[in-house]
Image (cartoon, helix red, strand yellow):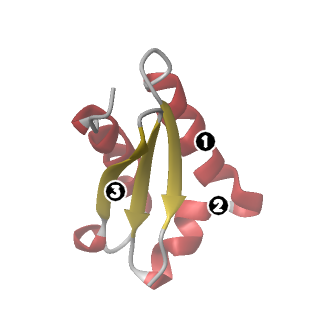
């Protein structure tokens, strides 16, 4: 524990990039908030934020579920969309 997972970053990036228009603006980073929580932050162009959030937050919720399922055995994961 205590280390970030490049696999989770790539998983989230693989989900987000096809959803957005400005693919070059996508940044996915991962930090460890404490020993049991990995925080994955997604940055996209402002005009693409709605596509990542989805109607009633369905898309971002689905991304969170997939990331948590992928990391279920070794750490807790939280996925956040960061706005500038």
The image shows residue 53, relative to residue 77, as above or below, that is below
Q: What whole-number distance in Å separates the C-alpha atoms at marks 2 and 1?
A: 10 Å
Judged left or right of residue 56, residue 62 is left
Comparing marks 1 and 3, which lies closer to the viewer? 1
Q: Do tag 2 and tag 1 residues touch (Cβ < 8 Å)?
A: yes
Q: Image point 47% across, 71% down: which residue?
A: 82
In the rendered structure, find residue 62 and report the number of the disc placed on it: 1
Q: Seen from this angle, which residue lies furthest right? A: 56
Foreground of the two, 84 or 1: 1
**Residue 49 x, y percent position in the rendering:** 52, 73
**Which quarter of the rendered picture does the N terminus lie within?**
top left
The residue that mark 2 highlights is 54
Figure check: 68 above or below 51: above
- Residue pictured at 32% horizontal, 34% vertical: 2
Number of other residues with Cα within 10 Å of mark 2, as a class: few under 14, some 14 to 19, many 20 or more: some
Give the mark, 2 or 3, whose residue is nearer the N terminus.
Answer: 3
Element on which disc 1 rests: helix
Residue tagged by mark 3?
17
């Amino acid at each position: 524990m205590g280390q970030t997972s490049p696999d989770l970053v790539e998983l989230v990036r693989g989900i987000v990039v096809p959803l957005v228009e400005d693919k070059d603006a996508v940044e996915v980073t991962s930090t460890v908030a404490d020993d049991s929580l990995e925080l994955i932050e997604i940055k996209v162009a402002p005009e693409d934020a709605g596509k990542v959030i989805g109607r009633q937050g369905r898309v971002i919720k689905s991304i969170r579920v997939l990331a948590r399922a992928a990391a279920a055995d070794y750490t807790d994961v939280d996925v956040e969309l960061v706005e500038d």
